[in-house]
Each structure stands twice: as structure tokens, then as C-alpha cells.
Amino acid sequence: MMISSRLFIALSAVLIGSICFDGIVEAQDSSDQNKSSGLPRGTTRLLDEVIVPAYLGGWTDVFYSELYPLVEKMNSDQLLALEAYGQTLGIGSIQRAFVNIMVQPAEQGLTWRAPNVSQTMTTYVASGVAARVQDELEAIAEEHIMQDPLTLPDGWRESEMVFWKSHVLKNRFDVLHRLTEYGQVIAAPHLKRARKNGDAAAVAQLEKAEQAVVTVTRMNRDLIEREAELRLLELERAESTFRTSEDFEERLNAAFALENHGLELELLFREHSPEEFERERLRDTAGLERAAQQFANGRKLGQHEIERACLLRIGTHWWLRGRYGVAPLANGLLKNPDAMNSDQAMFGLYMPQDLPQPISTAFEGEEKSPGYDRRHYYTWAVEYRPRIIQSTTDSYTAKSPLSDAKYTGNYFW
């Protein structure tokens, strides 16, 4: 007897979900809880037996395709009941999980044609995107580089991690830009209609998409200026190190800092004039001229170390990509099909926000198994990592929302 692929996936999802959450169906399928959920019995049964197990098992296509028609028919009260029901099942926000899956192409630099969906569905997605963006922005606002007074750590390693964190934040802002633009695109036609009809509740939800674009742009600009100010401080310290220290390690760190930050500042001020910035240090033309002189002087003093330092850092960068790079599809194992024809698509990877400490077997006491780090080690060792729901190659099937996706050449990393 032949079984359709969709039925097979659904049955597999049920099996996996049952293993992951033993007893969840029995506990939530009782008549008492069904009545208290505020949802129809058929809806809670579908959630218990298919949708939630699919989410727990990582079958994003089943989760999305089964949840979409349910959400599209729900009113605002039912959507609130759905969120509450997701909390009782221990999987958190169903809206957040749904939106995270739906916007993955936008995260990876893929553009969508605006889907022709109902205002209820658009409001559900747009408000979910806005909520996720708001959570991200609140977390970013707590980072050290976003705090005043702006200071640079004393050690080279510590300051390097500040700039690495800034790099991560800028990539997060790239993703947020794509998400907010996507939310704005899908919200625009329904926002106009809601304003015309005087639907204040829908207008309030849909306007969050427009407000998110403005907020993300403002905070990203602030981050860029703060990073530039720290680069000026680091450039001054590097030039001073060449004048005062003969220690090889100190000079090697100073060489990379000087060349890296000097070139980045040159590029920034080639594209923007000082009066365009808001932060006082970046508007100080006398200070900027002094920084340019420090860069030129440091290059003369450290000419022997600069080439070595840059080659070392380039090699380290590619080593880290090989060890810890995770591709955007198939749970990190595959790149976008456009990588066959595009260098940019081939380059795109997800990297960890906090750099891991590589395992070494050269010292006593180090763990011997696996004994080394290798590419995709953390992808394969799924039992040791947090759950990350990512799209798979199945997402390119005809009924998937990804079938309208077109590659634009921008990736998270």
C-alpha cells in the first residue's frame, strides 16, 4: 500500500513529537482542558496530534501548512486563545514560531512578492514581526556598545571582542531591516483599507510595521557612529603602542588594530562628511585630522608587523568559517541553490554570536572525545544544542511559501 509523502511526514511528525513530549496528547485532549482553551475541539485535536508534534520534530512544512488555514479563519479572541493554548503546551508563542518560519527567506536575503492574504492573516504576521523586532531591539539596547559613557576596554583581546560584538549586532540589524521591510510591504495595502474603514484596532497593529522600520534605522545609525568612535580610540592606542613598545605580541595586535580601524574609518569618512554625524567626536574636524596623521605615522612605524598581522587574521577568519559556519538551509547542512551560480550566495553562512573555544588534545585534562572541533560538529550533535527551527530543502515544494522567493544577494553572514 502506497502512502503519500505528506501523510508520511505528518505521521513521522506525530511519532517524533510523541517521543519528545510523552503524554502531551493525553494531557491536553481531555474535555475539561478543551473547554477551557476557548478553541473548538477539532482545532485543539489538530494542534495536539499534528501541529505541535510537527514543531517539536522540526517538520516546519507540516507545521506551517496545517497552522496557516487555522489562523486565517480565526478572529482576534480565538488568536489570543491560540497563544494561551501554546503556552499550556509548553512551546511558547505559536505566533512567534509561525512568523519565524514564514520570514526565513527575508532573513536570508530573499524577497517575496507580497502574498494575497486576508487582513486577519496580514495583521497576525505583521504584528508578530513587530513583536519579534521589538524584543531584538530591547536586547540590543542592553549591549555594552550602546551604553553611555562609551569606553574601550584596556586589553587588545577585550577590545577585539567589543568590535566582534558590534559586527554581530550590525548583521542582526541587517536581518531586522529585511524583516521590517517585509512587514511593511505586506501591511501596506491592508493598512490603507483599515484607515478608510475606521478599524482602529487593525490600524494600530499594522502601523507597528511602519514604526519598526524607523526605529531599526535610527538604532542602526547610532551603532555605526558608536563603533566609529571606538575605532578612533583604538587607532590612537595602536599608534601609541608602536611608539612606546618593543614587545612583539603587543606590536602585532597594534598592527592589526591600526590597519583594520584606519581603513574602516577612511571608508566611512569618504562616504560621509563630519556634519552628517550626531556624535560630537565624529564632528570634530581637528580630531579627525589628528587621527588621519596617527594612521599614517603608525603605518610607517609598524610596516613590518602589519602584513603579518593581516595575513594571520584573514587565515583565522576562514578557519572559523570552516569550523563553525552553518548554512542557511536543511538545518545548517545546505546552502541556497543559487550558490551554484552566485559567489554571494556561496559566501553566506550563519556564524555563532559568541565564538566557541576550540578543543585541544595537546594539554592534559582536555576531553579526548571527539577530541577536536570540525565543521558542522554542532549541527550533527543535535542532542547537545538548543532547538533551532530552520527551513529544509522540502520548503522549496510547490505549496510552500518559499516558492515565490527570489534571491537578492544578501545573507545574514
Image (spheres, rainbow, N blue to C red):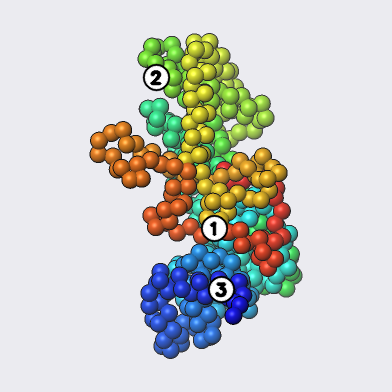
Q: Position of residue 57 (x, y in %)?
A: 48, 67
Type of residue at label 2?
Glu
Type of residue at label 1?
Gln
Q: Earlier in the sequence, mark 2 or mark 3?
A: 3
Give the Cα separation between the discs numbered 1 and 2: 42 Å
Q: Earlier in the sequence, mark 1 or mark 2?
A: 2
Quick check: 351 above or below 331? above
Residue at (25%, 39%) from the top-left corner? Answer: 365
Q: Which residue is tagged 3?
A: 8
Question: Which mark is in front, 3 or 1?
Answer: 3
Question: In this rendering, would 111 be left or right of 310?
Answer: right
The reply to whether the C-beta atoms of the residues labelled 2 and 3 are less than 8 Å apart is: no
Q: Position of residue 291 (x, y in %)?
A: 54, 19
Q: Position of residue 184 (x, y in %)?
A: 67, 58
Q: Which residue is tagged 2?
A: 250
Residue 91 in which image quadrant: bottom left
Give the Cα separation between the discs numbered 3 and 1: 20 Å
Q: Which mark is residue 225?
A: none
Frontmost residue, 382 versus 63: 382
Question: Which mark is in front, 1 or 2?
Answer: 1
Give neighbour class at mark 3: few <14, some 14-19, many 20+ (Cα, 10 Å): few
Question: Residue reaching furthest front?
Answer: 1
Secondary structure at numbered mark 3: helix
